[in-house]
Amino acid sequence: MRPMCPLCDEARDLILEVARDVPLDLEDFDITSDIEVYERYKWKIPVVAINGEEKLVSIIKEAPLREALRFAARSQNPGHR
């Protein structure tokens, strides 16, 4: 997240809405707190990383978010569908 970022706020709200159905841990990171991180992401935010990997960038929509979370869950529990 970046302070005063409406797209970040929208993404966070969507993630919290999806979290009602899908267990997840949400960690916000202020990219302005680290110049290297800021330079890397300033034109890409919001960015959603799942298990440490960038999965969604810039425009966060519900269907791709849910699919990325389902895929991550299947990857961690291959026998569970």
Image (spheres, rainbow, N blue to C red):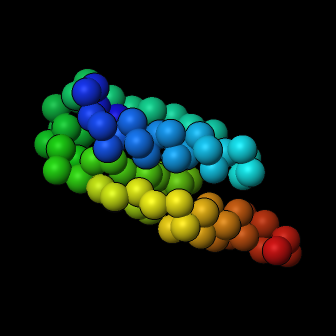
Residue occupying image coordinates x 74% and y 51%: 21
- Compared across the picture, whether 11 is left or right of 72 comes to left
On screen, residue 81 above or below 29: below
On screen, residue 59 above or below 36: below
Residue occupying image coordinates x 45% and y 60%: 61
Quadrant of the drawing holding the C terminus:
bottom right
- Give percent across and percent down for residue 58: 30, 56
Image quadrant where residue 36 sits:
top left
Residue occupying image coordinates x 24% and y 39%: 37
Quadrant of the drawing holding the N terminus:
top left
Residue occupying image coordinates x 25% and y 27%: 4
- Give percent across and percent down for residue 80: 85, 71
On screen, residue 24 above or below 29: below
- Give percent across and percent down for residue 30: 32, 29
- Give percent across and percent down for residue 25: 63, 39
| Residue 20 visible in this rendered orientation of the protein | yes
